Amino acid sequence: MPALGVNIDHVATVRQARLTYEPDPVWAGVLAELGGADGITLHLREDRRHIQDHDLYTMKKTVQVKLNLEMAAEAEMTNIALDVRPDQVSLVPEKREELTTEGGLDVITNSDRIRHCIDQLKEAGIEVSIFIDPDVDQIAAAKNLGVQGVELHTGRYADATSADDQQIEYETLVNASEFTIQQGLKLHMGHGLTYRNVSKIASIPNVSELNIGHSIVSRAVLVGMEQAVREMKALITS
Ligand SMILES: CC(=O)[C@@H](O)[C@H](O)COP(=O)(O)O
Ligand SMILES: NCC(=O)COP(=O)(O)O
Protein backbone atom coordinates (compact mmCIF):
# COMPACT_ATOMS: atom_id res chain seq x y z
CA MET A 1 0.00 0.00 0.00
CA PRO A 2 1.54 3.36 -0.97
CA ALA A 3 2.21 6.00 1.65
CA LEU A 4 0.33 9.28 1.18
CA GLY A 5 2.37 12.46 1.04
CA VAL A 6 0.05 15.46 1.27
CA ASN A 7 1.30 18.48 -0.67
CA ILE A 8 0.17 21.66 1.11
CA ASP A 9 1.49 24.21 -1.46
CA HIS A 10 -1.91 25.52 -2.37
CA VAL A 11 -2.89 26.34 1.19
CA ALA A 12 -0.03 28.83 0.90
CA THR A 13 -1.34 29.93 -2.51
CA VAL A 14 -4.54 31.13 -0.83
CA ARG A 15 -2.59 32.92 1.90
CA GLN A 16 -0.29 34.62 -0.61
CA ALA A 17 -3.32 35.94 -2.50
CA ARG A 18 -3.72 38.41 0.41
CA LEU A 19 -0.13 38.37 1.76
CA THR A 20 -1.55 37.63 5.20
CA TYR A 21 -1.06 34.90 7.80
CA GLU A 22 -3.98 32.61 6.94
CA PRO A 23 -4.53 29.90 5.96
CA ASP A 24 -1.31 28.64 7.51
CA PRO A 25 0.20 25.72 5.55
CA VAL A 26 1.94 24.48 8.70
CA TRP A 27 -1.41 24.25 10.46
CA ALA A 28 -2.74 22.43 7.40
CA GLY A 29 0.23 20.07 7.64
CA VAL A 30 -0.61 19.23 11.25
CA LEU A 31 -4.26 18.59 10.36
CA ALA A 32 -3.15 16.43 7.41
CA GLU A 33 -0.99 14.45 9.81
CA LEU A 34 -3.96 13.99 12.15
CA GLY A 35 -5.97 12.81 9.14
CA GLY A 36 -3.45 10.07 8.47
CA ALA A 37 -0.95 11.61 6.06
CA ASP A 38 2.26 9.61 6.02
CA GLY A 39 4.23 12.60 4.87
CA ILE A 40 3.98 16.30 4.13
CA THR A 41 5.27 17.57 0.81
CA LEU A 42 5.98 21.20 0.07
CA HIS A 43 7.57 22.87 -2.90
CA LEU A 44 9.74 25.88 -2.15
CA ARG A 45 9.72 27.50 -5.57
CA GLU A 46 12.50 29.88 -6.53
CA ASP A 47 9.88 32.58 -7.16
CA ARG A 48 8.28 31.96 -3.71
CA ARG A 49 4.81 32.09 -5.25
CA HIS A 50 3.31 29.99 -2.45
CA ILE A 51 5.49 28.30 0.17
CA GLN A 52 7.87 30.71 1.95
CA ASP A 53 11.16 29.86 3.63
CA HIS A 54 9.66 30.32 7.12
CA ASP A 55 6.95 27.74 6.29
CA LEU A 56 9.63 25.17 5.63
CA TYR A 57 11.56 25.95 8.81
CA THR A 58 8.41 25.88 10.97
CA MET A 59 7.14 22.73 9.26
CA LYS A 60 10.37 20.97 10.08
CA LYS A 61 9.90 21.75 13.79
CA THR A 62 6.19 20.93 13.84
CA VAL A 63 5.32 17.98 11.68
CA GLN A 64 6.30 14.53 12.91
CA VAL A 65 5.76 12.52 9.72
CA LYS A 66 8.13 12.42 6.75
CA LEU A 67 8.97 15.87 5.41
CA ASN A 68 9.52 15.91 1.64
CA LEU A 69 10.92 19.12 0.17
CA GLU A 70 10.42 19.65 -3.55
CA MET A 71 12.96 22.03 -5.01
CA ALA A 72 15.00 22.95 -8.06
CA ALA A 73 18.52 21.50 -8.26
CA GLU A 74 20.08 24.92 -7.70
CA ALA A 75 22.70 26.11 -5.19
CA GLU A 76 20.34 28.43 -3.29
CA MET A 77 17.86 25.63 -2.70
CA THR A 78 20.53 23.08 -1.87
CA ASN A 79 21.87 25.38 0.84
CA ILE A 80 18.39 25.77 2.33
CA ALA A 81 17.86 22.00 2.30
CA LEU A 82 21.23 21.44 3.97
CA ASP A 83 20.20 23.90 6.69
CA VAL A 84 16.67 22.54 7.25
CA ARG A 85 17.43 18.83 6.75
CA PRO A 86 14.08 17.49 5.50
CA ASP A 87 13.77 13.70 5.45
CA GLN A 88 13.66 13.73 1.66
CA VAL A 89 14.35 16.14 -1.16
CA SER A 90 12.56 15.65 -4.46
CA LEU A 91 14.36 17.46 -7.24
CA VAL A 92 11.94 19.02 -9.71
CA PRO A 93 12.23 21.23 -12.80
CA GLU A 94 10.99 24.80 -12.57
CA LYS A 95 9.89 27.43 -15.03
CA ARG A 96 8.81 30.86 -13.85
CA GLU A 97 5.99 31.09 -16.39
CA GLU A 98 4.44 27.67 -15.72
CA LEU A 99 1.19 27.29 -13.77
CA THR A 100 2.45 24.04 -12.30
CA THR A 101 5.27 21.58 -13.01
CA GLU A 102 4.83 20.76 -16.66
CA GLY A 103 7.18 17.81 -17.11
CA GLY A 104 9.82 15.80 -15.34
CA LEU A 105 13.37 16.96 -14.70
CA ASP A 106 15.61 16.10 -17.65
CA VAL A 107 18.32 14.18 -15.82
CA ILE A 108 20.15 13.27 -19.03
CA THR A 109 20.82 16.83 -20.22
CA ASN A 110 21.42 18.41 -16.81
CA SER A 111 23.33 15.58 -15.16
CA ASP A 112 26.46 17.46 -13.91
CA ARG A 113 24.48 20.17 -12.11
CA ILE A 114 22.07 17.63 -10.64
CA ARG A 115 24.81 15.25 -9.53
CA HIS A 116 26.53 18.00 -7.55
CA CYS A 117 23.30 18.78 -5.74
CA ILE A 118 22.53 15.09 -5.07
CA ASP A 119 26.01 14.39 -3.69
CA GLN A 120 25.73 17.24 -1.18
CA LEU A 121 22.26 16.19 -0.03
CA LYS A 122 23.18 12.53 0.33
CA GLU A 123 26.32 13.40 2.25
CA ALA A 124 24.07 15.24 4.73
CA GLY A 125 21.94 12.11 5.15
CA ILE A 126 18.97 13.42 3.16
CA GLU A 127 17.21 10.92 0.89
CA VAL A 128 16.95 12.12 -2.68
CA SER A 129 14.21 11.41 -5.19
CA ILE A 130 13.92 12.93 -8.67
CA PHE A 131 10.66 13.91 -10.33
CA ILE A 132 10.93 12.56 -13.88
CA ASP A 133 8.77 11.54 -16.79
CA PRO A 134 7.89 7.81 -16.97
CA ASP A 135 10.67 7.12 -19.46
CA VAL A 136 13.22 4.29 -19.16
CA ASP A 137 16.16 6.44 -20.31
CA GLN A 138 15.38 9.06 -17.66
CA ILE A 139 14.99 6.36 -14.99
CA ALA A 140 18.31 4.76 -15.96
CA ALA A 141 20.01 8.18 -15.88
CA ALA A 142 18.49 8.88 -12.44
CA LYS A 143 19.86 5.56 -11.19
CA ASN A 144 23.32 6.55 -12.46
CA LEU A 145 23.12 9.77 -10.47
CA GLY A 146 22.84 7.74 -7.26
CA VAL A 147 19.38 8.76 -6.05
CA GLN A 148 17.41 6.47 -3.77
CA GLY A 149 14.12 6.92 -5.60
CA VAL A 150 12.23 8.51 -8.44
CA GLU A 151 8.80 10.12 -8.56
CA LEU A 152 7.12 9.38 -11.86
CA HIS A 153 5.14 12.33 -13.22
CA THR A 154 1.49 11.24 -13.51
CA GLY A 155 0.37 14.47 -15.19
CA ARG A 156 -0.18 13.01 -18.64
CA TYR A 157 -2.32 10.22 -17.15
CA ALA A 158 -4.25 12.78 -15.09
CA ASP A 159 -4.78 15.13 -18.03
CA ALA A 160 -5.88 12.45 -20.54
CA THR A 161 -9.24 13.42 -21.98
CA SER A 162 -10.45 10.02 -23.21
CA ALA A 163 -10.50 6.56 -21.65
CA ASP A 164 -8.23 5.27 -24.44
CA ASP A 165 -5.64 8.00 -23.90
CA GLN A 166 -5.77 7.47 -20.16
CA GLN A 167 -5.19 3.74 -20.64
CA ILE A 168 -2.13 4.44 -22.85
CA GLU A 169 -0.67 6.76 -20.20
CA TYR A 170 -1.48 4.25 -17.48
CA GLU A 171 0.37 1.49 -19.34
CA THR A 172 3.36 3.80 -19.80
CA LEU A 173 3.38 4.33 -16.03
CA VAL A 174 3.10 0.59 -15.34
CA ASN A 175 6.06 -0.18 -17.66
CA ALA A 176 8.13 2.63 -16.16
CA SER A 177 7.24 1.39 -12.66
CA GLU A 178 8.49 -2.10 -13.44
CA PHE A 179 11.75 -0.69 -14.79
CA THR A 180 12.14 1.53 -11.71
CA ILE A 181 11.82 -1.48 -9.41
CA GLN A 182 14.25 -3.52 -11.56
CA GLN A 183 16.76 -0.70 -11.11
CA GLY A 184 16.44 -1.05 -7.32
CA LEU A 185 14.93 2.42 -6.92
CA LYS A 186 12.06 3.44 -4.66
CA LEU A 187 8.96 4.15 -6.69
CA HIS A 188 7.02 7.34 -6.00
CA MET A 189 4.32 8.89 -8.15
CA GLY A 190 2.42 12.11 -8.25
CA HIS A 191 0.98 15.13 -9.98
CA GLY A 192 -2.61 15.77 -10.93
CA LEU A 193 -3.96 12.82 -8.97
CA THR A 194 -7.56 13.25 -7.83
CA TYR A 195 -10.31 11.39 -5.98
CA ARG A 196 -11.49 10.20 -9.40
CA ASN A 197 -8.26 8.96 -10.93
CA VAL A 198 -6.10 7.80 -8.01
CA SER A 199 -7.33 4.21 -7.52
CA LYS A 200 -5.72 2.80 -10.66
CA ILE A 201 -2.40 4.41 -9.82
CA ALA A 202 -2.52 3.32 -6.17
CA SER A 203 -2.94 -0.30 -7.26
CA ILE A 204 0.22 -0.36 -9.42
CA PRO A 205 2.53 -2.83 -7.63
CA ASN A 206 5.41 -1.54 -5.51
CA VAL A 207 4.47 2.14 -5.41
CA SER A 208 5.87 3.29 -2.09
CA GLU A 209 4.68 6.92 -2.08
CA LEU A 210 1.97 8.98 -3.74
CA ASN A 211 2.21 12.77 -3.46
CA ILE A 212 -1.13 14.51 -3.82
CA GLY A 213 -1.85 18.17 -3.24
CA HIS A 214 -4.17 20.25 -5.36
CA SER A 215 -7.10 17.82 -5.21
CA ILE A 216 -6.89 17.35 -1.44
CA VAL A 217 -6.64 21.09 -0.78
CA SER A 218 -9.56 21.68 -3.15
CA ARG A 219 -11.72 19.15 -1.34
CA ALA A 220 -10.68 20.48 2.06
CA VAL A 221 -11.99 23.93 1.10
CA LEU A 222 -15.38 22.48 0.18
CA VAL A 223 -15.90 20.00 3.00
CA GLY A 224 -14.89 22.69 5.50
CA MET A 225 -17.16 25.44 4.12
CA GLU A 226 -20.33 24.57 6.05
CA GLN A 227 -18.58 24.59 9.42
CA ALA A 228 -16.65 27.76 8.61
CA VAL A 229 -19.86 29.62 7.74
CA ARG A 230 -21.63 28.27 10.82
CA GLU A 231 -18.82 29.60 13.03
CA MET A 232 -18.94 33.07 11.44
CA LYS A 233 -22.73 33.15 11.64
CA ALA A 234 -22.56 32.29 15.35
CA LEU A 235 -20.22 35.24 15.95
CA ILE A 236 -22.47 37.61 14.06
CA THR A 237 -25.68 36.50 15.75
CA SER A 238 -24.48 36.04 19.34
C1 LIG B 1 6.59 18.69 -8.60
C2 LIG B 1 5.16 18.57 -8.62
O1 LIG B 1 4.59 17.89 -9.35
C3 LIG B 1 4.32 19.32 -7.76
O2 LIG B 1 3.90 18.86 -6.68
C4 LIG B 1 4.71 20.68 -7.61
O3 LIG B 1 4.78 21.08 -6.30
C5 LIG B 1 3.80 21.43 -8.45
O4 LIG B 1 4.01 22.78 -8.27
P1 LIG B 1 2.84 23.63 -7.71
O5 LIG B 1 2.51 23.11 -6.33
O6 LIG B 1 3.38 25.00 -7.70
O7 LIG B 1 1.67 23.42 -8.64
N1 LIG C 1 4.82 15.81 -6.77
C1 LIG C 1 3.41 15.90 -6.91
C2 LIG C 1 2.81 16.60 -5.77
O1 LIG C 1 3.45 16.85 -4.77
C3 LIG C 1 1.39 16.99 -5.81
O2 LIG C 1 0.96 17.39 -7.06
P1 LIG C 1 -0.56 17.88 -7.21
O3 LIG C 1 -1.44 16.84 -6.58
O4 LIG C 1 -0.68 19.18 -6.47
O5 LIG C 1 -0.78 18.00 -8.68
Image (tube, rainbow, N blue to C red):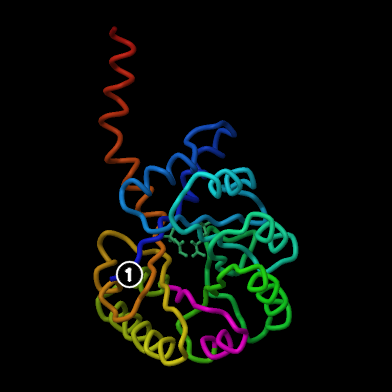
135 and 29: which is toward the camera: 29
- In percent of width and height, residue 66 lies at 46, 59
Query: Which residue position holds label 1?
Result: 2
The stretch drawn in magenta includes residue 103: no
Q: Residue at x 33, y 13 (%)?
A: 235
Cβ of mark 1 under 8 Å from ligand 2: the answer is no
55 and 226: which is toward the camera: 55
Q: As drawn, which residue projects farthest toward the top?
A: 238
Residue 160, compared with residue 33, is above or below; it is: below
Residue 146 sits in quarter: bottom right
> Given the image, on which type of amino acid does mark 1 rest?
Pro
Part of the protein shown in magenta: 138-153
Q: Quadrant of the C terminus?
A: top left
- In percent of width and height, residue 93 lies at 60, 69
Q: Residue at x 41, y 54 (%)?
A: 214
Q: Is residue 159 left or right of residue 223?
A: right
Label 1 Cα crowd, 10 Å radius (few <14 / some 14-19 / many 20+)? some
Q: Residue at x 48, y 87 (%)?
A: 135
101 and 205: which is toward the camera: 205
Q: Is residue 155 left or right of residue 226?
A: right
SS class of the residue under badge 1?
loop
- In percent of width and height, residue 223 lies at 27, 40
Residue 238, compared with residue 138, is above or below; it is: above
Residue 153 sits in quarter: bottom left
The stretch drawn in magenta includes residue 147: yes
- In percent of width and height, residue 1 lies at 28, 71
Q: How many marks?
A: 1
Residue 4, compared with residue 150, is above or below; it is: above
